[in-house]
Image (tube, rainbow, N blue to C red):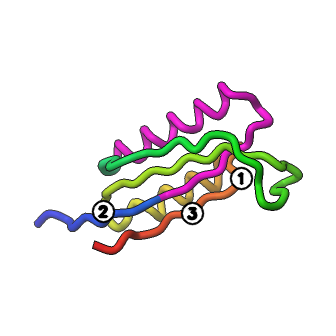
């Protein structure tokens, strides 16, 4: 029996202090991780934006948004990888209503 899939949206804010190449590497890393474990429905590159308040003494972050479909177990793994990856300032993963 096939596992049911769910639609999710994730927003990640990456540190810009390590330069554009580091940001690009993080974007590619997470796009690959998501596509290996589900289907990317859409992605939006919001680019560099001023943060509402400093996070880890940084005032600017690189925003990246992905809508994806996966099995319900995957977002917990994605969150775990976000937390152990250097250069990730903030993340949010939400389930979309079907």
Q: Pointer 2 and pointer 3: residues touching (CB < 8 Å)?
A: no
User: For mark 2, what is the residue?
Assistant: 71
* Residue under label 1: 89
Q: Is residue 8 left or right of residue 6?
A: right
Name the mark nearer the viewer: 1 or 2: 1
Identify the residue at image location x=51%, y=37%. Answer: 29
The picture places residue 93, in percent across and down from the top left corner, at 50, 64
Q: Main secondary structure of the magenta part?
A: helix
Q: Nearer the viewer, mark 2 or mark 3?
A: 3
Q: CA distance from mark 1 to mark 2?
A: 25 Å
Identity of the residue drawn at 34% across and 47% down: 40
Distance of label 1 from label 3 (alpha carbons): 11 Å
Within-10-Å neighbours for mark 2: few <14, some 14–19, many 20+: some
Magenta span = 10-36
Task: Check disc 3 and report the residue beneath it.
Answer: 92
Mark 2 to mark 3 CA distance (whole Å): 17 Å
Q: Earlier in the sequence, mark 2 or mark 3?
A: 2
- Res 77 visible: yes
Between residues 61 and 91, which one lies in front from this camera angle? 61
Q: What residue sits 45% from the left and 41% below the top?
A: 31
- Residue 39 pos. (x, y %): 30, 48
Quarter assignment of residue 95: bottom left
Q: Secondary structure at mark 2?
A: loop
Q: Residue at x 56, y 46 (%)?
A: 64
Residue 78 part of the magenta segment: no
Question: Can residue 22 be found in the magenta stretch?
Answer: yes
Query: Farthest residue in the bottom direction?
Result: 97
Depth check, front residue: 86 or 67 = 67
Looking at the image, is mark 1 or mark 2 earlier in the sequence? 2
Under tag 3, what secondary structure? strand
């Amino acid at each position: 029996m096939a596992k049911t899939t769910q639609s999710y949206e994730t927003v990640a804010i990456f540190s810009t202090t390590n330069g554009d190449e580091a940001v690009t590497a993080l974007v590619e890393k997470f796009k690959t991780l998501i596509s290996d474990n589900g289907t990317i429905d859409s992605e939006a590159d919001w680019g560099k934006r001023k943060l509402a308040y400093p996070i880890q003494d940084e005032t600017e972050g690189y925003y990246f948004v992905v809508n994806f479909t996966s099995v319900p177990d995957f977002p917990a793994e994605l969150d775990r990888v976000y937390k152990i990856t250097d250069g990730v300032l903030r993340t949010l993963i939400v389930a979309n209503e079907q």
